[in-house]
Image: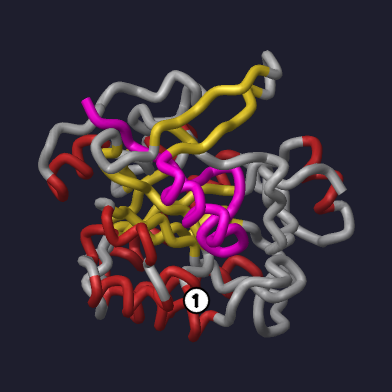
Amino acid sequence: MKEIISCSRRTDIPWWYYGWLQDALKAGSVELTNWYSNTQYTIDLSKDNVHSIVLWSKNYSNFLKDPGLLSDYNLYFQFTLNGYSKSLEPNTPSVDDMIIQMRDLAEKYSPKQINWRFDPIVLSTDGEDEPTTKIGRARLNRFEMLCAALSKFGIFRCTISFMDLYDKVEERMKRFSFVRLTDNQKIEFAYALIMIAKNYGIQLYSCSQTNIESVIGIKKGHCIDGEILTELFGDRASKAKDQGQRKACGCSKSRDIGKYDLKCSGNCLYCYANPKE
């Protein structure tokens, strides 16, 4: 069975390491390090071995300018678009630019090849584009604006999650004022998101968050979904759970080609992949 390639949970390769990715595809393989055993291993990127490549990014401008060797592969796009202020996502493109990118991807490929990620959800005053004291309402307003824009392109999948406070994330977030939500508050907020999404025909999915999966209107997410990839591209893809991911993750088995030492320069405060700073 051909493999699904994840590119990548570990860093935003399409944005910051696009040349590196093209070189790896040209070479037909990539060498990585197992961080636990400090051993080297190789992932075969030849077209005969790859079922599809799942790209994760906040910025597909490099790809849209020149797909390069990615044109030879089946592609699925995980596109994170939150619409936060620069204080939380300092180097992310403008919301308008990202909406245009989403439109261009939908037109050039298919809306079914795009999963919009509205995650992680962080409630704060400084995180919004405009000053506000009604932080929950401001985040819901942003979500509705994005639903209205993206649904026009036929994008009807959206993955949500709430910020996970890993130790390094919590240390980084100390300089930023945000609300620590209880599980009940997360569920209440999720209900509000569902009501908005329904108005635009958008289905919500969770990402590794069992506390909101019980909410009617939210389905358990499979960000890398072998069933969807098989339907899109034919040729059976693995539907087995990826044992390398945390227990709550619903992803199908894939090979991730990212490197934690390929630091993302987006510098989003909530990012769990970047090292502690």
Q: In x, y percent, where is residue 87?
A: 76, 71
Which residue corresponds to the image point at 15% horizontal and 47% vertical from the top-left? 233
Q: Is residue 117 left or right of residue 122?
A: left
Q: In x, y percent, where is residue 67?
A: 37, 67
Q: In x, y percent, where is residue 160?
A: 46, 52
Q: Is residue 188 left or right of residue 70?
A: right
Which residue corresponds to the image point at 47% horizontal and 53% vertical from the top-left? 56
* 95 and 93: which is toward the camera: 93
The residue stretch that appears in magenta: 1-28
Quarter of the picture holding the N terminus: top left
Q: In x, y percent, where is residue 121?
A: 58, 56
Under mark 1, the amino acid is Asn
- The correct choice, above or below, for 187 with respect to 12 in the image is above
| Quarter where residue 183 is shown | top right
Q: Is residue 3 magenta?
A: yes
- The correct choice, above or below, for 183 with respect to 119 in the image is above
Q: Is residue 228 visible?
A: yes
